[in-house]
Image (cartoon, helix red, strand yellow):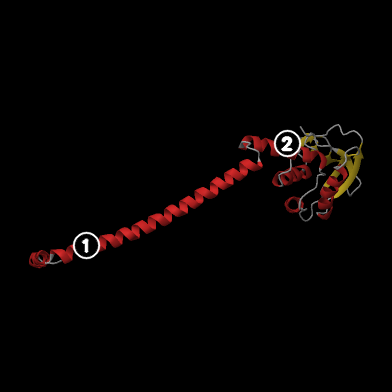
């Protein structure tokens, strides 16, 4: 730290040459102002560009939606999806297939049995049921396929898992409900079963996956 003597000597030098010192001070202040101003202008220019981009996006959004609000746009999209669901056949996507497969793979020594049922009058039920059946078949489930003309246990969601006691579902029903939830597929768990024969020829109650016409609001 400089001593008082050195500080007084510096002040003496400044007092002896006030004009050069003032010029240097002004020059330093000017340089700092130029740097700060340039930085501020760059930031301001960037913000203006972002604002202009957002304004163009908003204008484009309004133009495409004819001035509709976000809620109105959502209502239109929901309406289109509803109309599409009435005519588009239901299928399992690859991601859904993979998820379901990961849940329904039969552990070693376990024998799973399932009845797969579809409604005859339903246009896309058979193909949709084929998707599920392929997965279960490859997972080594014992499958019995049935076509129905009047599915009394149908679900408005288009898929029902049937088991004799929904509070204590059969292992197959429990596995399927977990798999469908993971794959984000809507279904109902309902009371019901199908009389089937196991590998020993003994009659037993089997869980059922029932595919019917989906009720679209």
The location of residue 29, given as percent across then percent down, is: 26, 60
Nearest the viewer among 58 and 10 is: 58
Total number of numbered discs in the rendering: 2
Q: Is residue 68 left or right of residue 212?
A: left
For the N terminus, give its image quadrant. bottom left
Where residue 181 sits, quadrant-wise, is: top right
Q: Residues within 10 Å of mark 2 (few under 14, many from 20)?
A: few
Distance between the alpha carbons at the discs numbered 2 and 1: 71 Å
Please name the residue shown 78% across and 45% down the image. Answer: 172
Please name the residue shown 75% across and 46% down the image. Answer: 175
Element type at marker 1?
helix
Element type at marker 2?
helix
- Residue bearing the label numbered 1: 25
Nearest the viewer among 215 and 194 is: 215
Q: Which mark is residue 34?
A: none
Nearest the viewer among 114 and 81 is: 81
The location of residue 12, given as percent across then percent down, is: 8, 66
The location of residue 182, given as percent across then percent down, is: 70, 46
Q: Residues within 10 Å of mark 1 (few under 14, many from 20)?
A: few
For the C terminus, give its image quadrant. top right
- Residue bearing the label numbered 2: 79
Q: Mark 2 against mark 1, which lies toward the viewer?
A: 1
Above or below 160: residue 179: below
Q: Is residue 171 left or right of residue 47?
A: right
Please name the residue shown 61% across and 36% down the image. Answer: 69
């Amino acid at each position: 730290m400089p001593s008082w003597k050195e500080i007084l000597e510096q002040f003496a030098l400044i007092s002896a040459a006030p004009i050069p010192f003032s010029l240097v001070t002004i020059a330093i202040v000017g340089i700092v102002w130029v740097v700060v101003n340039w930085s501020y202008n760059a930031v301001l220019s960037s913000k203006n560009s972002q604002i202009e981009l957002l304004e163009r996006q908003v204008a484009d959004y309004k133009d495409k939606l004819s001035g509709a609000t976000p809620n109105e746009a959502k209502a239109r999209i929901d309406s289109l999806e509803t109309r599409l669901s009435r005519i588009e056949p239901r299928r399992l996507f690859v991601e859904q297939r993979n998820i379901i497969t990961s849940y329904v793979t039969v552990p070693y020594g376990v024998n799973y049995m399932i009845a797969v049922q579809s409604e005859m009058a339903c246009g896309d039920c058979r193909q949709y049921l084929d998707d599920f059946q392929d997965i279960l078949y490859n997972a080594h489930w014992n499958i019995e396929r049935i076509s129905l003309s009047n599915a009394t246990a149908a679900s408005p969601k288009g898929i029902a898992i049937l088991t004799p006691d929904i509070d204590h579902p059969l292992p197959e029903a429990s596995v399927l409900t977990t798999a469908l939830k993971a794959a984000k597929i809507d279904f109902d768990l309902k009371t019901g079963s199908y009389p089937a024969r196991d590998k020993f020829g003994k009659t037993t109650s089997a869980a059922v996956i029932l595919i019917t016409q989906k009720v679209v609001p």
